[in-house]
């Protein structure tokens, strides 16, 4: 987001008088004075900055459930200056609900596939837009939400008992959590892009979130569009493109929240194998197969049960399923049956390794390279995947025949 001036003018006398005399009923604020249009606009602007929304039907400014407008207004009067908008002071912009649902669904996230009780994280929760979307995608998750602003943290905590809110900065939370060894099965985040003391704070938040991911876990993060071209983000861009991808988001994605700016969406997958290059398929692992009632296709399963035996009721026989690696373009986890039937219309669905790139099909040698069905069926992403795979392949070595000795 663009940096803004942090000059805070004194609170106008008319605003101070109107807020002092306002009647507060729970989360509703009623102005008791009839104000001229210009004075009313000043008062309404301050209330909107504090998080209120005017309701014509109730003839009041409504604050989110769980918030405390009395405390907010009292603090504003005590400071005596016009409050900064959260976008300028904290880099906070609410994620619209429709967009939040998209971020938490396939092909961005595998939240819906995670087993009950999986620990997931939203590191900059605000009033809980993404947290609520996480639980809509999978109501059985254990959600940790980080939000330093007390009022917004209270709103987020009131959404669902499955949410644990940590009212502290993400930096403090990450330092403490890293020390405990806790890692998350998924992270979805819309971090602040810039704050007064750090114009690229999103880079640090992305780094901290990456270190809190469990092996095979998926990270979804909204970032500024400058990641694609900005020279100062060369290293960050290379890191993202190694572990996943970034793609443009609609310019008006945040228009329902009162702003428009260019953004991109980053999706990353934490490596499962120690080498970190999961997109290059090694020979199938010889781990002891574990019997499952249904195929388990998550990152946690790739670590704890990379080889599974599943009774296919349709075929009336056992089938062996193996974790193969991730898509080289987007990082999506890929699995395959030993019998070679990896139709995406079957049990594997979008997790099938059946679209992966085999060098023998191009008369080359090297490892098979992971490609998911989504990237394989998109011309631009397919070309990108093929180009990356080609760097790992070579021409076959032809040993000339030696004539027998006379």
Image: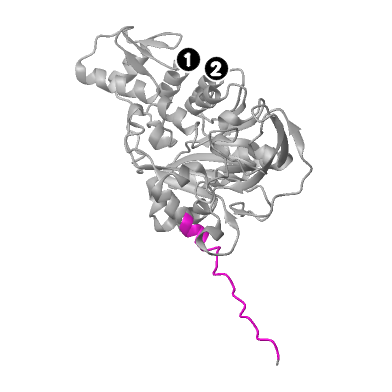
Specify the quadrant that holds the N terminus: top left
> Residue 151 in the image: x percent, y percent?
50, 22
Characterize the local packing of mark 2: few (<14), some (14-19) or many (20 or more) Cα atoms within 10 angstroms: some
- Looking at the rendered structure, which numbered label has been put on residue 127? none
> Residue 199 in the image: x percent, y percent?
43, 47
Mark 2: which secondary structure?
loop
28 on left or right of 156: left
Residue occupying the point 57% across, 24% down = 138
Q: Which residues are magenta?
A: 386-405
Residue occupying the point 66% across, 25% down = 116
Q: Check whether the beta carbons of the residues at disc 1 and disc 2 lie within 8 A of each other.
A: yes
Verify whether residue 381 appears in magenta.
no
Verify whether residue 400 appears in magenta.
yes
Kindly give the residue lying farthest to the right in the view shown: 288
Residue 96 visible at all: no
Q: Which residue is mark 2?
A: 158
Q: Judge by depth and name the residue closer to the eye, 215 or 323.
A: 323
341 on left or right of 200: right
> Residue 107 in the image: x percent, y percent?
49, 37
Residue 334 vertical position relative to residue 117 in the rendered view, above or below: below
349 on left or right of 323: left
Kindly give the residue lying farthest to the front in the view shown: 406
Q: Which residue is mark 1?
A: 65
Residue 52 visible at all: yes
Residue 17 vertical position relative to residue 99 in the rendered view, above or below: above
Total tally of numbered discs in the picture: 2
């Amino acid at each position: 987001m663009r940096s803004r001036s942090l000059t805070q003018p004194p609170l106008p006398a008319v605003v101070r008088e109107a807020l002092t005399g306002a009647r507060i009923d729970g989360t509703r604020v009623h102005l008791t004075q009839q104000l001229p249009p210009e004075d009313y606009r000043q008062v309404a602007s301050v209330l909107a900055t504090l998080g209120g929304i005017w309701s014509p039907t109730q003839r009041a400014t409504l604050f989110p459930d769980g918030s405390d407008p009395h405390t907010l207004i009292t603090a504003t009067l005590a400071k005596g200056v016009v409050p900064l908008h959260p976008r300028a002071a904290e880099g906070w912009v609410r994620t619209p609900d429709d967009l939040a649902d998209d971020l938490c669904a396939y092909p961005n996230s595998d939240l819906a596939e995670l087993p009950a009780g999986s620990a997931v994280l939203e590191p900059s929760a605000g009033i809980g837009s993404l947290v609520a979307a996480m639980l809509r995608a999978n109501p059985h998750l254990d959600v940790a939400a980080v939000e330093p602003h007390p009022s917004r943290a209270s709103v987020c905590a009131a959404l669902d008992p499955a949410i644990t809110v940590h009212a502290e900065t993400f930096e403090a939370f990450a330092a403490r959590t890293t020390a405990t060894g806790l890692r998350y099965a998924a992270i979805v985040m819309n971090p602040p892009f810039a704050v007064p003391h750090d114009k690229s704070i999103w880079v640090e938040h992305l780094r901290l979130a990456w270190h809190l991911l469990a092996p095979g876990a998926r990270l979804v993060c909204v970032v500024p569009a400058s990641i694609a071209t900005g020279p100062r983000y060369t290293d960050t861009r290379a890191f993202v493109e190694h572990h996943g991808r970034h793609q443009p988001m609609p310019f008006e994605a945040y228009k329902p929240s009162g702003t428009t700016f260019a953004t991109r969406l980053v999706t990353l997958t934490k490596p499962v194998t120690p080498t970190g290059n999961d997109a290059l398929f090694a020979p199938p692992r010889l781990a002891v197969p574990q019997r499952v009632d249904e195929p388990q296709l998550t990152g946690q399963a790739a670590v704890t049960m990379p080889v599974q035996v599943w009774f296919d009721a349709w075929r009336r026989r056992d089938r062996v399923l193996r974790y193969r690696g991730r898509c080289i373009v987007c990082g999506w986890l890929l699995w395959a049956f030993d019998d070679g039937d990896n139709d995406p219309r079957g049990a594997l669905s979008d997790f099938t390794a059946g679209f992966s790139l085999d060098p023998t099909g191009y008369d080359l040698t090297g490892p098979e390279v992971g490609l998911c069905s989504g990237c394989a069926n998109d011309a631009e992403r397919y070309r990108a995947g093929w180009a990356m795979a080609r760097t790992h392949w070579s021409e076959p070595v032809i040993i000339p025949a030696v004539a027998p000795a006379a």
